[in-house]
């Protein structure tokens, strides 16, 4: 409990920004892979899933942070899961009310947000130790970073797999779509290639930094 | 109530719609525990067992919730039941067979956050399977999960010896291999239906 009662650092923009790129949940931390692969066969599904996850993440972070002094340490994981499950049920019914078509497209994966390790991970690693405002910013940043990653995958898969983006055709009529990108294997390939790109960028940055240090004696 | 024959349900869950390679459920242990053949096999066994038990519980809960007219409690009660099942199984194995308990180690509690288990509970409810069908479905899903995990572990053990660029090594390479495996499993399409 000592870590909770320590003086809290002030709110900073970094709480929000770090989730978008530097600690991106999908590309850097490789968390929450199941929905990332499963619902990204079109841009609109990816966007809906990303926003639903962000919604749950922000609300659960808020509640966990508010209750962080009241939750006994021994049962904290069970409590977090219950909090998350309640918000996921809310989102499930919300999407069903807003668009039945979308609810059908996402199927059981809305309910499966409960076991998205990203949300439990943020509750445990951040919200249970920090103030409400910082936790909200953290949830928002991580959620939007997650949405961004889903859109990266969904965009590529929809453009190549059906020659369209958000349902708008991009190519002339002669385009032969790569059906494989819409199939499950396309998800694995696309995510693998994105991770490869991120590895490459990180390796190059490290190299540059190494060279810079080499120049300065 | 679904009238699918049992063998068709089993083939469907294990091969045609493999939980890992077609539904993307349980990707975390698939990527995390598939480094070694031995651990992959044990993990598969543990998941099979938990799947059977939680399938049984999910069937009961679903009917209880329908009886008291509270379907909105479905998700919460499923997750609580799965978490407690894993805990119970852990205590039971610890008591009856300490050897097996040591062999499974950390993988046992981690099964709670395996989305394949919750997915199974949700799917069998959505499909309206009866008790026997649910159990066969759970067995098929467990066998399919184990199969994918063991195949992946076998390939990764070989890959350790291959010379690939440093940049590709790790998750990126595993995902590519999973993509090829998933393509191969597409060959089973139409088998069970």
Image (tube, coloured by chain):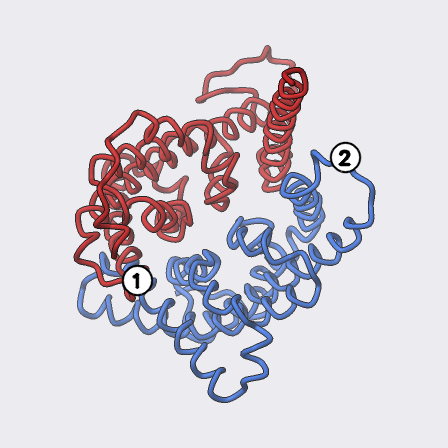
Q: Chain of mark 2?
A: B
Q: Residue at x 27, y 62 (%)?
A: A73
Q: CA distance from mark 1 to mark 2?
A: 42 Å
Q: Is residue B95 above or below residue B35?
A: below
Could you tell me residue A153's position as x and y percent? Answer: 52, 30
Q: Nearer the viewer, residue B63 or B56?
A: B56
At a point 51% along the width and 24% down the height, the residue shown is: A155
Circle 1 chain: A
- Residue nearest the viewer, comparing A4 with B168: A4
Left/right of residue B81 with respect to residue A188 in the rendered view: left
Apparent colour of chain B: blue
Q: Write down the residue under mark 2.
A: B165
Q: If the image is split into quadrants, where does the C terminus of chain B sit?
A: bottom right
**Chain A, colour shown:** red
Looking at the image, which is closer to me, B4 or A128? A128
> Is B76 positioned to the left or the right of B51 in the image?
left
The residue wearing badge 1 is: A78
> B17 above or below A196?
below
Q: Quadrant of residue A135?
A: top left
């Amino acid at each position: 409990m000592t870590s909770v009662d320590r003086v809290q650092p002030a709110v900073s923009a970094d709480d929000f920004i770090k989730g978008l790129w530097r600690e991106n949940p999908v590309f850097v931390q490789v968390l929450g892979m199941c929905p990332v692969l499963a619902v990204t066969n079109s841009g609109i599904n990816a966007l809906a899933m990303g926003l639903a996850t962000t919604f749950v993440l922000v609300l659960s972070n808020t509640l966990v942070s508010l209750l962080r002094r009241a939750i006994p340490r021994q049962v904290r994981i069970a409590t977090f899961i219950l909090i998350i499950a309640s918000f996921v049920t809310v989102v499930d019914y919300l999407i069903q009310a807003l668009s039945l078509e979308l609810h059908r497209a996402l199927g059981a994966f809305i309910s499966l947000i409960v076991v998205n390790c990203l949300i439990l991970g943020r509750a445990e690693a951040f919200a249970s130790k920090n103030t409400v405002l910082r936790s909200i910013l953290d949830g928002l940043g991580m959620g939007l970073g997650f949405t961004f990653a889903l859109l990266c995958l969904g965009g590529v898969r929809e453009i190549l797999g059906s020659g369209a983006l958000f349902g708008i055709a991009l190519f002339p009529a002669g385009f032969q779509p790569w059906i494989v990108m819409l199939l499950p294997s396309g998800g694995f390939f696309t995510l693998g290639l994105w991770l490869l790109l991120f590895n490459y960028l990180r390796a190059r940055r490290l190299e540059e930094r190494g060279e810079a240090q080499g120049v300065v004696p | 109530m679904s009238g699918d024959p049992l063998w068709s349900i089993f083939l469907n869950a294990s091969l045609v719609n493999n939980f890992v390679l077609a539904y993307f459920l349980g990707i975390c242990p698939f990527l995390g525990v598939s480094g070694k053949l031995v651990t992959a096999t044990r993990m598969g066994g543990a998941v099979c067992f938990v799947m059977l038990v939680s399938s049984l519980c999910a069937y009961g809960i679903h009917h209880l919730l329908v009886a008291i007219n509270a379907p909105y409690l479905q998700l919460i009660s499923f997750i609580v039941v799965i978490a407690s099942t894993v805990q119970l199984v852990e205590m039971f194995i610890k008591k009856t067979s300490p050897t097996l308990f040591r062999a499974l180690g950390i993988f046992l509690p981690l099964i709670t956050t395996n989305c394949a288990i919750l997915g199974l509970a949700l799917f069998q409810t959505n499909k309206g399977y009866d008790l026997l069908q649910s159990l066969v479905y759970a067995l098929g899903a467990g066998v399919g999960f184990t199969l994918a995990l063991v195949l992946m572990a076998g390939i990764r053990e070989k890959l350790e010896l291959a010379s690939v660029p440093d940049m590709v090594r790790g998750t990126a390479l595993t995902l590519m291999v999973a993509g090829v495996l998933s393509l191969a499993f597409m060959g089973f399409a139409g088998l069970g239906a």
